[in-house]
Image (tube, helix red, strand yellow):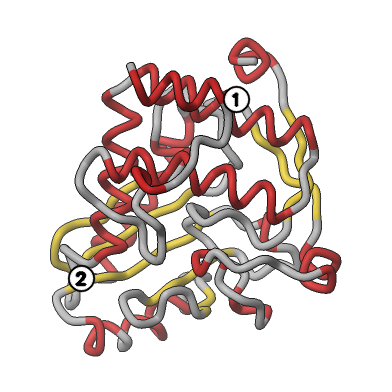
């Protein structure tokens, strides 16, 4: 499975994304998958599309650095805590959708709404995603969400979103075993072309477990220790 990530591309049917998707399709008026709710047939049909899970590309890091320099400059009046590369493209060696996910810390979320117009002048589109703790953007403005190249959250350092994204990224960067397990999971689900509910549930299990090991409960998640093992292999991994 891991070898396939190194040498080929796997395409998967995608709907709203996963509970860990740092982007979202709330701009299309659909329910945030982080609530853990099941997407109905209409949601799956409306948002379905082919996305490419591609081998890790070192160019992603340079693309982030280029964008970080731009964002550091244009967000200077509100920035606090830096601009961070998050999501799967931020983890060396991990196969990923080729969408650059980023998160920038701001001093005050209400004041930072003034940055919406500034970012729009640089090609970003504002849409709703966890609006109680973030201001979210994507670019370019395309018809299908999986054709985007950049996604950006503005949030206050220390928010739940901030902790979840950085903790998960750093855990996989530091643990080759976790990275390999997550990659195997992603590629397996892609090859099976599961329905959206199944894809969401399986990724949420993994993310919840990784965050729980760092003392973080994923927003809306049942603590992992209270959840049954999804399969025998997962149970054995948790015992090791």
Give the image location of residue 68, x and y in percent: 32, 52
- Which quadrant is home to the C terminus? top left
| Residue at image location 46% in from the left, 78% down from the top | 121
The residue furthest top is 3
- Vertical arrangement, residue 65 with respect to residue 38, above or below: above
| Residue at image location 77% in from the left, 50% down from the top | 195
Give the image location of residue 175, x and y in percent: 31, 22
User: CA–CA distance between discs 2 and 1?
Assistant: 32 Å
Give the image location of residue 46, x and y in percent: 82, 70
Dividing the picture into quarters, in which one does residue 79 lie? bottom left
- Vertical arrangement, residue 153 with respect to residue 3, above or below: below
Q: How crowded is mark 2: few (under 14 residues within 10 Å), some or many (20 or more)?
A: many
Query: In this view of the protein, which residue sits in the foreground, 46 or 81?
Result: 46
- Vertical arrangement, residue 111 with respect to residue 167, above or below: below
Sequence-wise, the earlier of marks 2 and 1 is: 1
Q: How many marks?
A: 2
Dividing the picture into quarters, in which one does residue 109 lie? bottom left
Dividing the picture into quarters, in which one does residue 154 lie? bottom left
Query: In this view of the protein, which residue sits in the foreground, 38 or 63?
Result: 38
Secondary structure type for disc 1: loop
Label 1 sits on residue: 55
| Residue at image location 21% in from the left, 41% down from the top | 214
**Side (left or right) of 160 relative to 228:** left
Label 2 sits on residue: 156
């Amino acid at each position: 499975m891991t070898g396939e990530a190194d040498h080929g591309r796997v395409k998967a049917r995608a709907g709203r994304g996963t509970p860990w998707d740092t982007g979202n399709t709330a701009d299309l008026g659909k329910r945030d998958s982080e609530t853990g709710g099941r997407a109905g047939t209409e949601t799956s049909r409306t948002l379905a599309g082919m996305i490419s899970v591609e081998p890790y590309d070192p160019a992603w890091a340079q693309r982030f650095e280029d964008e970080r320099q731009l964002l550091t400059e244009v967000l200077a009046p509100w920035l606090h805590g830096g601009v961070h590369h998050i999501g799967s493209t931020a983890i060396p060696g991990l196969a990923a959708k080729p969408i650059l996910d980023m998160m920038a810390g701001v001093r005050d979320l209400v004041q930072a709404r003034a940055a919406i117009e500034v970012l729009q002048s640089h090609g970003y589109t504002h849409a709703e995603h966890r609006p109680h703790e973030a201001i979210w953007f994507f670019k370019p403005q395309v018809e299908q969400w999986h054709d985007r190249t950049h996604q950006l959250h503005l949030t206050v350092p220390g928010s739940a979103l901030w902790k979840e994204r950085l903790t998960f990224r750093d855990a996989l960067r530091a643990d080759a075993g976790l990275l390999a397990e997550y990659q195997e999971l992603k590629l397996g689900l892609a090859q099976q072309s599961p329905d959206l509910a199944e894809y969401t549930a399986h990724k949420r299990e993994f993310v919840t477990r990784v965050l729980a090991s760092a003392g973080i409960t994923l927003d809306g998640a049942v603590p992992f220790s209270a959840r049954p093992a999804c399969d025998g292999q997962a149970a054995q991994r948790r015992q090791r």
